[in-house]
Amino acid sequence: MSTSALSNRNYRIYFAGSAISLHGLWVYRVALGWFTWELTGSEFWVGTVAFTQFAPAVVFGPIFGVLADRFDRRRASILINVTSAANMACLGLLALFSQVDIYVLVAQSLVQGALDGAHTPVRMTLLPNIVEKIQLQSAIATTSISFNVSRFVGPAIAGLIIATLGVGAAFVVNGISYFAYIIALMMIELRPSVARPDIPSNVWQEMLEGVRYVVSHRTIRGLLFIVAVTSVFGRGALEMMPAFADKIFDRGSSGLAILTASIGVGAVSTGLVLMRNTAWLNSRVIKISVVIAGVLIVVFGNIDSLWLAVPIVMGIGIIMSLCGVGSQILIQTLVEDEVRGRVSSFWGMIAFGGTALGSLLIGTSAAVFGLQQTVIVSGLLCTAVALISPISDSKE
């Protein structure tokens, strides 16, 4: 049997639907960041809206991680995506009729953040049910490539839509894109998961069992810590891109699209490497990469030219993808299937919750101390904390 996930019919269908939906996601993210900056011109609000996108993962992720281990993952995913499409349609119509202020935008972003936080563990646990075990690493890496291709194609689409039809249309386009994912889920056949108990135990007890599993597993515990460092100090800083594009580089939404696309190009490069071979991948490699990411963020904070910034953020994209995708590959390879949903939810909680916390802290600090100075400090902290982070490559 081929180790390539693309040789699997079910995965090819899933990949196609997911790719369309991911393009919609990046149209939404660029439109949301730019709309926030356009409404307020404030780093604080840019950070706050980024916070609302990712913070709900802390609350909803673990709960849905338990449910992903207990209930039908396909049905849960379809329900969440239908609700997301409805939320995007609502936001899009409000924006098209000029009924959105910053408070409405924050509320709508918070709702979507809750839905995305709920879907993360469900989405992550679907892949092992779609492909064979020997195809799992390929599936994770290939999905990452799709995510990051959409990272630089999506912003280009967003820029065109915003320039011609407005941000409301961009939100509606994202809402429509969810149906490609829903249709793909309805078409594929899923491999069975491990048998679930007939009488489910208490949700909180199951969540606690998941926490104990992570705490007792040295490698997974260390990987989650380094993901937290990257999310707070690395991805949190990158959420300031709308402010950099306009305030520092004076390039507006087109500059934001260029920066976002550059990160995506770097991340795709990492995905291509991981898709071919992961024999070299371990937690120490990820730790070293995060140390380097902090240095690049410091350099980025000192740059005043968009075109000098492009290769730097491309390098940051390479490293952020290595940490995000690499940690997922290692964790999904090590974790037992009966706790896969819960462990995946902890990864999502830390990755998205850390980004939420980082963007809020960095956005607030930037409004007080200055944008570039705050990002430089964030990069220094990323390097320093990564250097002292506990890392183990043991299997237990």
Image (cartoon, grey):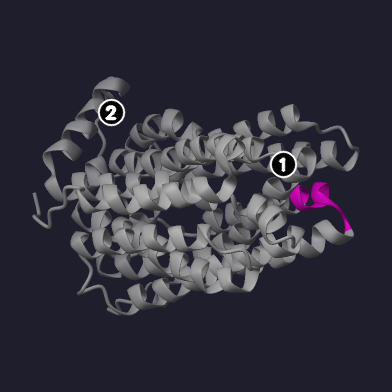
Mark 2: few/some/many CA within 10 Å (<14, 14-19, 20+): many
Magenta: main secondary structure equals helix
User: In this view of the protein, which residue sits in the foreground, 297 or 315?
Assistant: 297
Q: Position of residue 21 (x, y in %)?
A: 61, 57
Circle 1 sits in a helix, a strand or a loop, which is it?
helix
Could you give the CA–CA distance between mark 1 and mark 2, rounded to whole angstroms?
A: 35 Å
Horizontally, residue 93 falls left or right of residue 365, namely: right
Which quarter of the picture shows residue 217?
top left
The residue most toward the right is 97
Q: Nearer the viewer, residue 363 or 372?
A: 372
Q: Which residue is mark 1?
A: 36
Pick the front one: 256 or 23: 256
Whether residue 179 can be seen here: no
The amino acid beneath tag 2 is: Met
* Viewer-proximal residue among 328 and 315: 315
Residue 380 lies in the magenta stretch: no
Instruction: Tell me what residue is drawn at x 22 percent, y 58 percent.
Output: 333
Q: Which residues are magenta?
A: 165-172
Mark 2 lies on residue: 207
Circle 1/circle 2 CB separation < 8 Å:
no
